[in-house]
Image: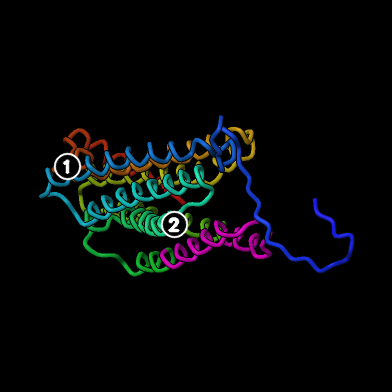
Amino acid sequence: MFSNCLGFSVSMSVRTCMYNMEGNTRDYLSEGKTQLPYLYFCFFWVYMVLAGIWTHVCVKQKATVHRIHILMGILVALKALYMFSEGEDMFYTKKTGTPHGWDVAFYAFSFLKGVMLFVVIVLIGTGWSFLKPYLQGKEKKVLMIVIPLQVLANIATVVIGETGFSDKNWLTWTQLLLLVDVICCCAVLFPIVWSIKHLREAARTDGKAARNLAKLTLFRQYYIVVVSYIYFTRIVVFALQIVTSYHYTWISELARELATLAFYVFTGYKFRPIPHNPYFMLDEEEEEAAVDEMLKDDEFEL
């Protein structure tokens, strides 16, 4: 409390500092976020293990490795570095109140991981490199839309992270980030649907109904998983943030990272580089059953 009774002109610099006490130690994170550094470090080691497993699989199955598999490995590595930088950011903030420069690394890896994630989803959805060697015009347009939007989304993330409610443009950047994220999530679904329709048409003309049915089933599963991943990480996690007590805000981050890990594992397992993919190998009985299935007029819509 300060009062100037004599009316003199007074100037001063005021530094505010907010923290919780854990015994005799200051904790500069809020109570619901104090567990996050350890959580992020745990996921960092999980993704490092996944990166090692993926590298081993690619080296072992070198003859069947495609370019998309290399990009998938890069994505896992970027995700691990993203978790490490976020863990370091939170750790130093918890101990000292400032991130000591780790926020710069966090924003950098966040940008690279975000762009690579959507690029990989789009490329897998188009069947690039493992079903066809090139992208069609409309598929290139999707990438041309998604990549600049991800750049804009990461700019918005930086502005939101480095400012606060007191900034007059904070709400605008928050709404922009939400809009861009929704557009990107919708855009990545179109190539998967195009691949599904293309496989249905090919199955009726090339005489390989069973093989195309297997591919069709795989892409349908991938479509459902992508939609579920987007729905969970954007809507369910947001709902968790609202309904949980501030003591347990870390639970929503745990749920988000578990869903992301499950999505990475599913994608890697389904599209791993193995010779004679069992999804594309079926016997004669299954071939006949596939023909009957393909004769059904069953359209798959977005």
- Image-based side of 128 in relation to 106, left or right: left
Q: Position of residue 152 (x, y in %)?
A: 49, 66
Residue 285 painted magenta: no
Which x, y percent locates residue 253? 50, 40
Q: Name the image colouring.
A: rainbow
Q: Residue at x 60, y 62 (%)?
A: 173
Residue appearing at x 54%, y 35% in the figure: 25
Amino acid type, residue under disc 2 in the picture = Gly
The answer to whether any part of residue 103 appears in the image is yes
Place of residue 278 in the rendered image (x, y in percent of width and height, measured from the top left): 19, 38
Give the camera-side residue of 48 and 123. Answer: 48
The residue drawn where x is 36% and y is 53% is 121
Q: Which of the 4 image quarters holds residue 147?
A: bottom left
Q: Of the residues shown, which amino acid type is indicated by label 1?
A: His
| Residues under numbered marks 1 and 2 in contact, where contact means CB atoms less than 8 Å apart | no
Secondary structure beneath disc 2? loop
Residue at (50, 41) in percent of width and height:
232
Corner quadrant of residue 221: top left
Q: Nearer the viewer, mark 1 or mark 2?
A: 2
**Which span of residues is magenta-colored?**
147-176
Q: Is residue 168 magenta?
A: yes
| Residue named by callout 2 | 101
Where on the picture, by quarter, is residue 175?
Answer: bottom right
Q: Principal SS element in the magenta part?
A: helix
Q: Marks 1/2: CA distance? A: 34 Å
Foreground residue, 128 or 182? Answer: 182
| SS type, badge 1 | helix
User: Which residue was labeled with disc 1?
Assistant: 56
Is residue 194 among what the camera can see? no
